[in-house]
Image (cartoon, grey):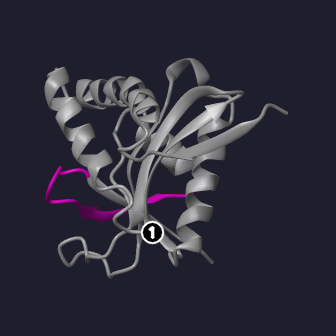
Amino acid sequence: MKKINYAQIYKEDRCLCETARELWIPFIKEVRGHQGEDPDEAEILEGLEKRIAIQGSRKDMHFEVMFLEGMPVGIAMFAVDLGTVYGLLEKGFGTVMGFYIRPAYRKQGLGKAFWFHVEETLRGDGASKFYLCPDSVTGVPFWSKMGFADSGLTDPDDEKPIYTKRMG
């Protein structure tokens, strides 16, 4: 079994921030490309820096890189949602705001392993239910396999369906 580990991104760790950049840019380009958009790299980096800047402000907010045998293969941003998603869902859901595995490493169980890590972390933060707004091309098939289902609700920010999963 190959060794998998995870590292929390913080702005003080410029090396890990560079690793995050190498993963976040293709992630955003892929997802936005599925929507027919061609995002500007400077815009992507500005968004990434904002996400990195808030790390450490809450113990239940995470932005992590997944490593396989020391090679960065994935990135995820996840937290316990302190709001109510515009009154659509009750407070306390764990949410995934970004999740990416490099294409060359997909279909090897790494996404599933990363999700189990995210789920375990969020459960440790007090979440027993989860939501996300998956990309329709790569996200919906993956998250459906992980037990998420379309709630019938739509996130007003990005106009994507909200998928939920509750623990039994």
The residue drawn where x is 40% and y is 23% is 22
In the rendered view, tell whether residue 166 sits above or below residue 155. below
Find the residue positioned furthest to the front.
12
The residue drawn where x is 52% and y is 78% is 126
Is 158 in the magenta? yes
In the rendered view, tell whether residue 103 sits above or below residue 81. above
The residue indicated by pointer 1 is 59
Quick one: quadrant of the C terminus? Answer: bottom right
Q: Pointer 1: residues within 10 angstroms few (<14), some, or many (20+)?
A: few
- Looking at the rendering, which quadrant does residue 85 occupy? bottom left
Give percent across and percent down for residue 99: 44, 42
The residue drawn where x is 17% and y is 73% is 86
Q: Nearer the viewer, residue 52 or 29?
A: 52
Give percent across and percent down for residue 56: 39, 60
Task: Look at label 1 and name its amino acid.
Answer: Lys
In the rendered view, tell whether residue 22 sits above or below residue 97. above
Give percent across and percent down for residue 2: 79, 31
Is 23 in the magenta? no
Range of the magenta residues?
A: 146-160
